[in-house]
Amino acid sequence: MTKKYIFLDRDGVIFKYRQNRYVNCVDDIEYIDGSLLALKKLHSAGVSVIVISNQAGVGKGLMMTEALSKITERMLDDAAKAGGEILDVFYCTHNVDENCDCRKPRPGLIFSAAKKYGFDPSKTYLIGDNISDIEAGRNGGCKTILVKTGNAALKPSDEWTAKPDFIEPDLLSAVKRVLNEDFGLI
């Protein structure tokens, strides 16, 4: 059986979206209802979760890498306590103006993860809350699902620069869709 992977954005998908504010410390973490259950469902189905997230707060000097590490550690621990698992986390910590290849909507994080784990990104999904997530997924060859628990929900769909393959209210609904389709891509 072929191993299955899925990409998830973090803020607005797993963590509650904080408009104009970063999740700068573990005390800022608030999980979206059902997100930990979604991670459990993916793990139970044998799907490896890879989180890819822009974290420009580090590049801007608003957060230290140590704080980001503690936030990540807590997320991994909380996922495990809920019966889920996050295989790996890839962050772009560059500032917006650094013009790197890893900042979404560019697909560098997708390609790095796919290379590390030896899979074809066109055989999976990227679930995000922002149009830059959808653009990154498209640029990386993934199927895309936009969840309405974060940034994109604040903008009318006619302002979106990319259209997702699917739109779901939250991560749990998106995961149910993916699992019901049984990853028909693979």
Image (cartoon, helix red, strand yellow):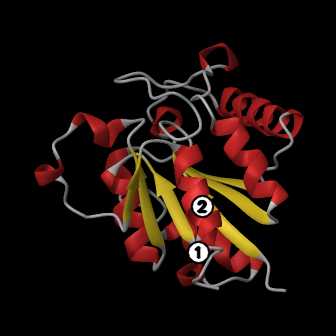
Q: CA distance from mark 2 to mark 1?
A: 8 Å
Most extreme residue toward the top, as rendered?
A: 27
Q: Image point 42% across, 42% down: which residue?
A: 169
Q: Quadrant of residue 172?
A: top right
Q: Earlier in the sequence, mark 2 or mark 1?
A: 2
Q: Is residue 186 above or below residue 154?
A: below
Locate residue 15, reporting x and y percent.
57, 31
Q: Are marks 2 and 1 in contact (CB under 8 Å)?
A: yes
The residue identified by callout 1 is 124
Q: Is residue 58 left or right of residue 183?
A: left
Location of the N terminus by quadrant is bottom right
Residue type highlighted by circle 1: Thr
Q: Is residue 21 above or below residue 38?
A: above
The residue identified by callout 2 is 7
Foreground of the two, 5 or 104: 5
Q: Is residue 87 left or right of residue 102?
A: right
Q: Quadrant of residue 74?
A: top right
Location of the C terminus by quadrant is bottom right
Query: Could you tell me if residue 106 is visible in this image?
Result: no
Most extreme residue toward the left, as rendered?
A: 158
Name the disc covering residue 178, or none. none
Q: Is residue 114 above or below residue 24?
A: below
Locate residue 39, reporting x and y percent.
72, 47
